[in-house]
Image (cartoon, rainbow, N blue to C red):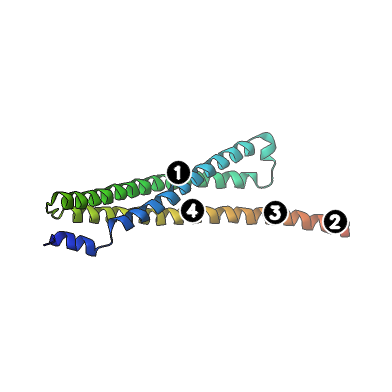
């Protein structure tokens, strides 16, 4: 007769499917962390240019420096969230693998596994859910910084458009001003 606790566990989503899902999230999360790191490096390099004598003369240099200074703490927060999410996802994988080991070990030894595999599976699924929630928060932060940067680029485009319009007006009619 099968252990009733194992029947409950097999009625749940199998640990292998959850491990696969956690692995997929880990790969994309690792990529996200790399993009945040690269973005911090890009902004740092750009800031170094903007504080030079020549950089200070660039159009909207002050606004760009302000945008960079506002984005860096958000990028640091995104990085912390991603690291927490990765920790939760790795923990989920470990708990789900332990679940499989306990099930296999119990079946191999002919010992009733009891409620421990179910508890580990629930904890693993909970850790997986927590990691996914953290990633959804990080996505919102990412969208916010992107929106701010797009607004700066719109302002920069308007700046250049106004220069172009002014030049065009002078070329068409030098007396107009």
> Mark 4 falls on what kind of element?
helix
Q: Which residue is tagged 1? A: 76
User: Which x, y percent locates residue 82?
Assistant: 41, 48
Residue drawn at point x = 33 percent, y = 58 percent: 17
**Residue named by callout 4:** 142
Label 1 secondary element: helix
Camera-nearest label, 1 or 3: 1
- Going from N to C along the chain, the mark reached first, 1 or 3, is 1
Q: Which residue is mark 2?
A: 170
Q: Residues within 10 Å of mark 2 (few under 14, many from 20)?
A: few
Please identify, in this view, whether the residue under mark 1 or under mark 2 is nearer the observer: 1
Q: Mark 4 or mark 1: which comes first in sequence?
A: 1
Of all residues shown, which one is farthest toward the top? Answer: 52
Q: Are marks 1 and 3 in contact (CB under 8 Å)?
A: no
Dot 1: within a 10 Å radius of its alpha carbon, few (fewer than 14), some, or many (20 or more) residues? some
Q: CA distance from mark 4 to mark 3?
A: 26 Å
Q: Which mark is residue 159?
A: 3
Q: CA distance from mark 1 to mark 3?
A: 30 Å
Instruction: Check if mark 4's residue and mark 1's residue have beta carbons within 8 Å.
Output: no
Residue shown at 13% from the left, 61% from the top: 2
Query: In the rendered image, which quarter contains the N terminus?
Result: bottom left
């Amino acid at each position: 007769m099968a252990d009733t606790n194992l029947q409950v566990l097999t009625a749940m989503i199998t640990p292998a499917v959850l491990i696969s899902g956690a692995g997929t999230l880990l790969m994309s999360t690792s990529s996200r962390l790399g993009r945040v790191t690269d973005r911090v490096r890009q902004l740092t390099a750009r800031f170094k240019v903007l504080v030079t004598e020549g950089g200070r003369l660039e159009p909207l240099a002050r606004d760009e420096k302000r945008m960079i200074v506002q984005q860096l703490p958000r990028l640091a927060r995104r990085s912390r969230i991603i690291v927490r999410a990765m920790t939760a996802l790795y923990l989920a994988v470990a708990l789900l693998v332990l679940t499989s080991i306990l099930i296999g070990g119990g079946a191999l030894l002919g010992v009733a596994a009891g409620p421990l595999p179910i508890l580990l599976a629930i904890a693993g699924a909970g850790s997986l859910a927590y990691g996914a929630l953290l990633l959804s928060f990080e996505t919102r932060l990412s969208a916010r910084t992107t929106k701010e940067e797009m607004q700066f680029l719109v302002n920069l485009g308007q700046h250049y458009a106004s220069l172009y319009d002014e030049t065009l007006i002078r070329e068409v009619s030098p007396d107009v001003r």
